[in-house]
Image (cartoon, grey):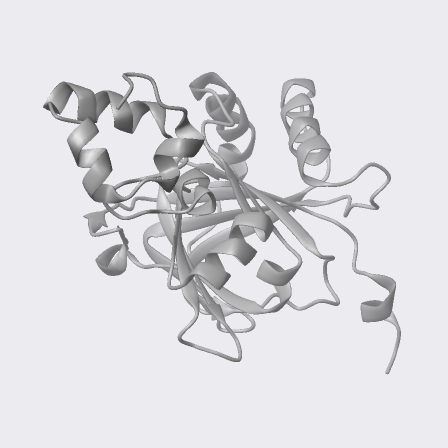
Amino acid sequence: MSAFVSPAVRCALPKSVLRSWCKSRQHLAAYGSQTSHYNIRNRSTVAEETKPFHRYLDASDAATEDILSRDMIIHENFLSEEEEKCLLNEVEPYMKRLRYEQDHWDDAIHGYRETERRNWNERNMTILQRVKELSFPPGTPQLAYIHVLDISKEGYIKPHVDAVKFCGNTIAGLCLLSSAVMKLVHEKDKDKFANILLRQRSLYIMKDAARYDYTHEVLPECQSVFRGQVIPRDRRMSIICRNEPLPEHTSDS
């Protein structure tokens, strides 16, 4: 056999013939590097080999992964350390005057304190504008007040779906102070779920199917595990932007 065989021909050849041609380990390695579209050992398809690996998303099945890779987007390292500090410096003086609550009005959050803030200093307004431009299509009406949610080290958020009458189809949150694991579970099929790794200083964008078809929760410290790795939990603060409720969710029934 010629020393040069086109990739198209190689893919069509029987495995026994290919082994004869790839006599040495060096040839076999070279063959593997040249034929990215075909794997001799498992004959993976092009789609399988080029499928992106979401290091922040661990889904129960392929369909759930496809949905949440589109509607649960994480931008890691969205904030610099200096930007995180700037945001904290503005909200900490007020948050420290509050005590952590154990009972939320809808029993969804335990060990939390929260506030809403409309006016921010110029530096932080620039950061929040970046969040909005990345998270919402141009012209999307947004809530004027930005939600600040502070969860203690021992705190957690129970499975729930946000009330549609209070906000629209997209939530964009900055993760400050600590990493955490969020879990999403399909409301109608509990066997379909995913764990989402929210790293410190990341931005998460939860929209559409992730908002309406799945419950979401932030796991307590004792369950804070992602792909078998313990994710240390500490006090965690989220700064959350939302769009206005959709018209069909605000009209009286």
Is residue 12 visible in the rendered structure shown here?
A: yes
Drawn side of residue 160 relative to residue 49, left or right: right
Judge left or right: residue 191 versus residue 26: right
Which residue appears at 30% of the width and 44% of the height? 234
- Residue 145 image-quadrant placement: top right
Looking at the image, can residue 108 be seen?
no
Q: Judge whether 158 appears above or below 131 on screen.
A: below
Across the whole image, how many numbered discs are drawn on residues? Answer: 0
Q: Residue at x 68, y 51 (%)?
A: 170
Q: Using the image as rendered, state which of residue 38 and residue 84 is in the foreground.
A: 38
| Rendered location of residue 109, percent (x, y) | 46, 64
Q: Residue at x 71, y 28 (%)?
A: 129
The percent position of residue 248, horizontal first and vertical second, equals 85, 69
Q: In the image, residue 79 lies at what x, y percent? A: 50, 25
Residue that extends furthest to the front in the rendered view of this protein: 1
- In which quarter of the view is residue 53 placed? top left
Q: Residue at x 41, y 35 (%)?
A: 37
Q: Is residue 160 above or below residue 226?
A: below
Q: Is residue 52 above or below residue 42?
A: above
Name of the residue lying farthest toward the left: 24
- As drawn, which residue projects farthest toward the bottom? 253
Image quadrant where one finds the N terminus: top left
Q: Is residue 234 left or right of residue 102?
A: left
Most foreground residue, 149 or 214? 214
Image coords of residue 26 (percent x, y) = 15, 19
Quarter of the figure that contains the C terminus: bottom right
Q: Could you say which is closer to the camera, residue 224 or residue 120?
A: 224
